[in-house]
Amino acid sequence: MEQTLIPPAEQERELSKAEAEAEMSPLAAASSPQARALRLEIIAVGRKLWERQYVDGNGGNISVRLGERFLLCTPTMMSKRDMEPADICLSDLGGNILAGDRLRTSELLLHLEIYRSSPRARAVVHCHPPNATAFAMTGSVPPIGLISEYETSIGPAALAPYETPGTQAFAETVRPFARDHNTILLSNHGIVCWADTVSHAEWLVETFETYCKTFLIARQIGRPLKFLPPDKIGELLEIKRRQGLPDARMRS
């Protein structure tokens, strides 16, 4: 396999950046320009979730990695419509709050399990879209092979078994699936998606919810579903492979 050599000067810059991050205090990390930008992205995505009725009350939670030592997450007991920058918490990778006036989301353990299981995950969004959650209530996932755009972004969704939300046992239900699935249904609960950014994780939520809704509508037409041919699925998987997206079918 061809490898790209990194110039020595660039290696030194990356090393200096890593060293600076390792020495950065939690307070400095929380007030950094990157943290400010990520807070605004979390707030924007939270409002999208609320406007699309993917969350209600104080439901749902969002997190994003901030460097290699920290992450930002939404607080507990707060509507995703009403968040402000000061409400976003800074946590370490053990779930300990390091900066912020509010308590962190009780389901941060779920996010941490995904980050540990899938190094590619840099952001996590958990919510309760109606059509997706309907599948979670029945312990089932929609079939694959029906819409090309869905195949290249998500493909097979996983179904995690039920556990009490907010517990370590609940967090561990996603461990077998997080590496090869960017979208996981949480039985009798909702959905969790991960991606490289908060916005991209929310896109996956939208894509999955729309796919579930469209599938349910198609079944009402009363005609057999028309699945994509296997060779065309293979072409879509190759696109997905080039994009670096996960798919359990690519491991077989």
Image (cartoon, rainbow, N blue to C red):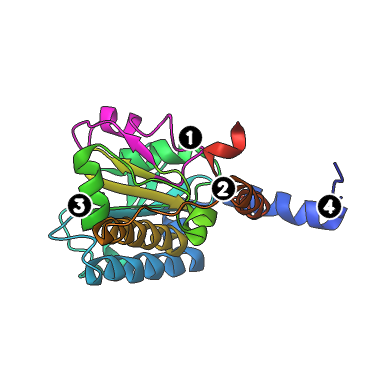
Return the residue at label 1.
Answer: 117
Q: Quadrant of the C terminus?
A: top right
Q: Position of residue 56 (x, y in %)?
A: 15, 61
Q: Secondary structure at mark 4?
A: loop
Query: Does residue 239 appear to the left or right of 82 in the view shown?
Result: right
The residue lying furthest to the front in this view is: 223
Q: What range is drawn magenta here?
A: 158-183
Provide residue 198's location: percent of width, then percent of height. Answer: 43, 60
Q: In terms of secondary structure, where does tag 1 sit?
A: helix
3 and 4 marks in contact (CB < 8 Å):
no
Q: State which tag comes first along the sequence, 3 or 4.
A: 4
Q: Earlier in the sequence, mark 1 or mark 3?
A: 3
Q: Which residue is mark 4?
A: 6
Amino acid at circle 4:
Ile
> Which dot, 1 or 2, sits closer to the camera?
1
Mark 2 or mark 3, whichever is nearer to me = 3
Task: Name the front one of labels 1 and 3.
Answer: 1
Mark 4 or 2: in front is 4
CA gap between label 2 and label 3 equals 29 Å
Q: Residue at x 24, y 43 (%)?
A: 136
**How far apart are the alpha carbons under marks 4 and 2?**
24 Å
The dot on residue 23 is 2
Check if mark 2's residue and mark 3's residue have beta carbons within 8 Å: no
Q: Which residue is under mark 3?
A: 76
| Residue found at x 55% / y 45% | 246
SS type, badge 2: helix
Q: Callout 2: 10 Å neighbours few (<14), some, many (20+)?
A: few
Residue 43 drawn above or below residue 115: below
Task: Measure how far apart labels 1 and 3 are at the Cα level.
Answer: 24 Å
Q: Residue at x 84, y 57 (%)?
A: 9
| Residue 74 shown left or right of residue 232 in the figure | left
